[in-house]
Amino acid sequence: MRYAAISLLPLLSAASPVLNVGTIHNDAAPVLSSVHAEEVPNSYMIVFKKHVKHAGAKEHHSWVQSIHKERQTDRMELRKRSQFPITEDVFEGLKHTYNIVGSLMGYSGHFDEETIEQIRRHPDVEYIEKDSIVHTTKDDYETEKNAPWGLARISHRDSLSFGTFNKYLFSADGGEGVDVYVIDTGTNTAHVDFEGRAHWGKTIPANDADADGNGHGTHCSGTVAGKKYGVAKKANVYAVKVLRSNGSGTMSDVVKGVEWAAEAHLSAVAAAKKGKKKGFKGSAANMSLGGGKSTTLDLAVNAAVDAGIHFAVAAGNDNADSCNYSPAAAANAVTVGASTMSDERAYFSNFGKCNDIFAPGLNILSTWIGSEHATNTISGTSMASPHIAGLLAYYLSLQPSKDSGYAVADITPKKLKANLISVATKGALSDVPSNTENILAWNGGGSSNFTEIIGKGGYTVGKDSEKTENGKVTITIPSLHEVDEDIKTEFAQAKKAAGRKAHNLESKLEKLTADIEEFVAEEMEGLFDEFKARVARELRLSGDYSDFTINCHGDKHKVHRMIICPRSKYFEKACGFGRENEDKEINLNGDEYEPEIIKLMIQYLYELDYETPGATERATPGLRYQSEPPVSNANLQWRRYFAKGLAGLNKSAMAEAMKVFHKYNPKTEIKPKVYVLRSNPPLNAPASPFGVPASPFGVPASAFGAPVSAFGASVSPFGQAFVNTSPQQRLEEELAAIVDREGTSGGVPWRPLSLQQAPVIHAKMYAIAEHFDIPRLKDLAMDKFLAWTEDHYTNPGFYDAIDVVFDEERTLEEDGALRDVVAGLVCEDLQVWGLDSRIEEKLREVPGLAFRVLKKHFDGSGCDR
């Protein structure tokens, strides 16, 4: 085959309609290979020399297509003669053409070796680079579902503390007028956190859907511009899909995505100059992906920056020199490493002279796919980079008024990158190699005055004394007693020095003391709510230190009086001292007590949240998890099973459960630390990350890091409604049988609940919250009800829930909020589907439903809920 192919070269060259043999030179262009990358066979990116203009490039493209077509024709002829194997590859030819604002011109395609040899010898070709696979730079390690701390960190100079760990200081207009291109797997543009500011830009991979089937791009977009999870909360997001749903794609597709973003930006600039895009202040871009070293991708990013896009790219997750990866090595972009909540370089984060800055990248909570409310917590430099893309957009939107119109703006990407670095917090992180800049991003502490932020300059930890932040005095408060003593000392000194002014000073200091006490009380209340929920979950699951057991129709729950009693009168019968029997049990066996509701109410009073029955099909606003992973992710599955129902088994039953689990996962080794019971927590536990020696309940702080807690917020695998006998179903049935037989020490055996039951459960929880005046539970149940009835027409449980919602013994007529929601949903069904038999039956049976539906139909509000 090789000899036959080579013999065709002179013939093909001479037959070319555009290029004759005389124009081919002997100084062939080099063929570059990506470093540390998986190359795509027979796929190349070709870059022109600087002298090539548009017309010449177009002529070259025609020539390439011509010789490629001739080669394919000849190959088919040789195949017919059996000189080529029948299985020989079919080469696709020209794929993309590139022209990034004149700085980078070229094309990509799928060619055989002989065609590439001819292209190499063309005088217009600078070099050829083999195409390669790129991936998202997400770190796939398991994570605990914690609140998004990253926003708080970039808005404070000092390490996070009681008063700052969940507080993000920002300008309300941050990001307004700025477009951000997220070049990734796509974006869930319907997510409520984007408030309609997320748009689909372009899908580059051929024959792929305009949707994020992975979640990675949506997560990045949320960190950039989400209302709750984003740095620049008013920015517009444009999804540029270059990676498929599996999180991988080709370098050539990524380059094409960069080109699209650059052209879209230039179009926006032109529109702004014509007055057709008012308030436009510029564009930023985020690329949380990477592969091996690619000169073409680096040049493409640099060219996009030259066109005016402020670019952030991930440094990579290999704990290696970022200069060996692309686009991390692109000189004009801002290359971002990842930091942790404890101010360390994340163990996976790349480093080196190509790193420009660090941003939070471990355990970052943001938007996800699967529903309009879904969230997920993941880690990686992929999560750090959008913090910076958002910050670039944030700073662009805070330009002084003299250059807020983009046409006259003088803040170039190079200048803003320098500003970003100059105001960053220096020396904040540990474990940063000496060849890497140790600087952590800062957003100006909430200031909306860009000139003021830049004027403050940088801050070096251990050297500069941060006395002010955002123009306000910042006071570090170890304890109220210490503060009070300090104030008294300062007062005494001032009184002695000021003489007659002492009285006025004393009054001011007394007011300051009162203000500080009020502030600290508010901060501590919010902080303890966070910690108590986490510790309380551990106590609920383990049953350790419980006061008594609630027995509801055979379901037993070990509980703690100090947790369930103060938060609601729902368990008033159980909360009186001396009401338990000799086995320390309180029996709640009346008809008004339902085992499933008792279980969820206990969970809510411990965690201020409750899990949705059958919650594997849709994430809800109150739950921070995504769908349960496949059973092949065995260690994760086992840990979640353990957390949900196996924790209380005795040693022999645990061994039996492990044996059953191993039967369905024969290649998985279950690590002992995952299933060892924590019945005896260590007495000398280390302090928590915030310096708290113990939890509010006296449990050592090390309990936060126990294996079970890491998976406590994940979706429960025990409420799924299966319609077949899959291996996962059979596994769960066998595990459930063991738990049912043996019982548990801290929880109850799981009972599979169908999807149909979920809306009914939420309606009952809402009714309880209404009756016992629990506003937070009421809002939570409403959110969950709305999420689970999104597809209410196909869910029979919705019609069962109607009975609960309109049950006068359960819900109060004067509230009516959930009744209005149900009436709105029925009204929508009538408009879309007409009078269905199920709707007609409910309208006849349920008092009040027909009236509310008619009222919505005729009062001018339509079917608004």
Image (tube, rainbow, N blue to C red):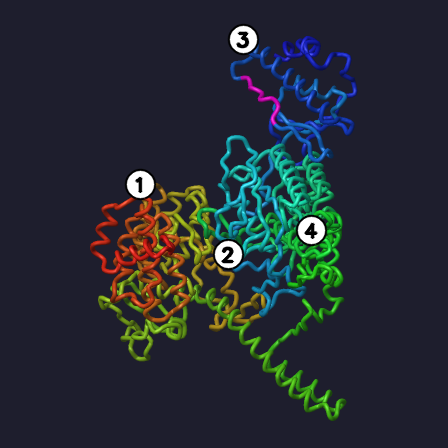
Mark 1 — residue?
724
Mark 3 — residue?
82
User: Camera-side residue: 349 or 375?
Assistant: 375
Mark 4 — residue?
405
Residue 718 in view, yes or no: no
The alpha-carbon separation of the residues under discs 3 and 1 comes to 50 Å
Q: Which residues are magenta?
A: 88-95
- Disc number for residue 144: 2
Q: Are marks 1 and 4 in contact (CB under 8 Å)?
A: no
- Helix or strand or loop: what does disc 2 sit on? loop
N-term mark: 3 or 2: 3
Instruction: Please tell me whether residue 89 belongs to the stretch shown in magenta.
Output: yes
Q: Are marks 1 and 2 in contact (CB under 8 Å)?
A: no
The alpha-carbon separation of the residues under discs 3 and 2 comes to 60 Å
Taking the image as shown, residue 862 lies to the left or right of residue 281, namely left
User: Camera-side residue: 394 or 428?
Assistant: 394
Quadrant where the N terminus is found in the figure: top right
